[in-house]
Image (cartoon, rainbow, N blue to C red):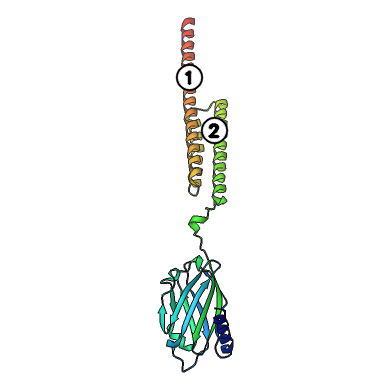
Amino acid sequence: MILILLLITTISCVCAGTFFVKVTQTDYQAEENDSVTLEWTFTTRSDKSPNLLMILCKLVTDHRVSVVYRLHDGVEVPEDEQFSGRVQCDRDVLREGRLRLHVFRLRTNDSGQYKCVVSTRYGLSADKCWLNVTATVAQEQHTTPNVSPEPLSQERFYNLLCALIMTAVIILVIILWVAAAAAGWTVANVVIRVIVVIAVVVYSIAVATVTAPAMAVLVLALGGLTLLAVFVALLIYCMCRCWVRGQERQQQQLHKVVTIENSD
């Protein structure tokens, strides 16, 4: 066995000056499921027939050695199961001294050293290159959705705006009610002023909800219902006060009439 290895080494050294194999690129980078073309060049002669070529390309890793492509006397020999149906050789360019292997549907375990040995009746030589196949990570499976802070800030802005509007309206309604009670305004005047304030609030809510998020729209709607409830309560209170005052005035007038009749 040692003698055979020495003989092969001696033949290779003797023929190195007339026949050689050279890889065109030493390092290849590719992604999973992509394709790559590995290329070597070798010495050729015009009188050489491709049928006399013997080619053996192997993948060498720390764990295994796999046959990628094999050509024996012009006949392609099936490759290992790992590369079955995924390797194609350009037979047309062999006469030009070029060996091109196309590897399709790359896998991560295709990474390693690719060594190609070419043998003819003029000599034997080999060269190697390295291929690194990286895995493609699906974004839907390995990434978490980023929550943009902008919608949250916008929602807080509309909630704050709604709270400020409701607070201002309630203060205005209370001021109107106190002013009406102090000035002795009638129910009609109070109702008209409250309706004007409510109309302004409803318009502001309508404008704000055009671009507001769903949560802000809900808060604004609840605010509008709260203002409506306040308006109805004030209206009922004013009506009751006016009715009580009307009853008191009728009793006062009746009392005056009775007093006048008794004095007569």
The image quadrant that residue 80 belongs to is bottom left
Could you tell me residue 264's position as x and y percent? 47, 5
Task: Work out which quarter of the rendered image holds the N terminus and state it.
Answer: bottom right
| Res 73 label | none
**For the view shown, which residue lies furthest in the bottom direction?**
47
Q: Alpha carbon of mark 2 to alpha carbon of mark 1: how far? A: 22 Å
Q: Residue at x 52, y 28 (%)?
A: 185
Could you tell me residue 92's position as x and y percent? 43, 85
Q: For mark 2, what is the residue?
A: 173
Q: Nearer the viewer, residue 33 or 2?
A: 2
Q: Return the disc, 2 or 1, that comes first in the chain's sequence.
A: 2
Q: For mark 1, what is the residue?
A: 244
Could you tell me residue 38's position as x and y percent? 51, 77
Q: Please, what is the three-letter code of the amino acid marked with disc 1?
A: Val
Q: Is residue 210 above or below residue 86?
A: above
Secondary structure beneath label 2: helix
> Which of label 2 and label 1 is nearer to you?
2
Secondary structure beneath label 1: helix
**Label 1 neighbourhood size at 10 Å, few (<14), some (14-19), many (20+)?**
few
Q: Nearer the viewer, residue 52 or 182?
A: 52
Could you tell me residue 26's position as x and y percent? 57, 77
Q: Is residue 34 above or below residue 229?
A: below
Q: Please, what is the three-letter code of the amino acid marked with disc 2?
A: Val
Q: Is residue 11 visible?
A: yes
**Label 2 neighbourhood size at 10 Å, few (<14), some (14-19), many (20+)?**
many
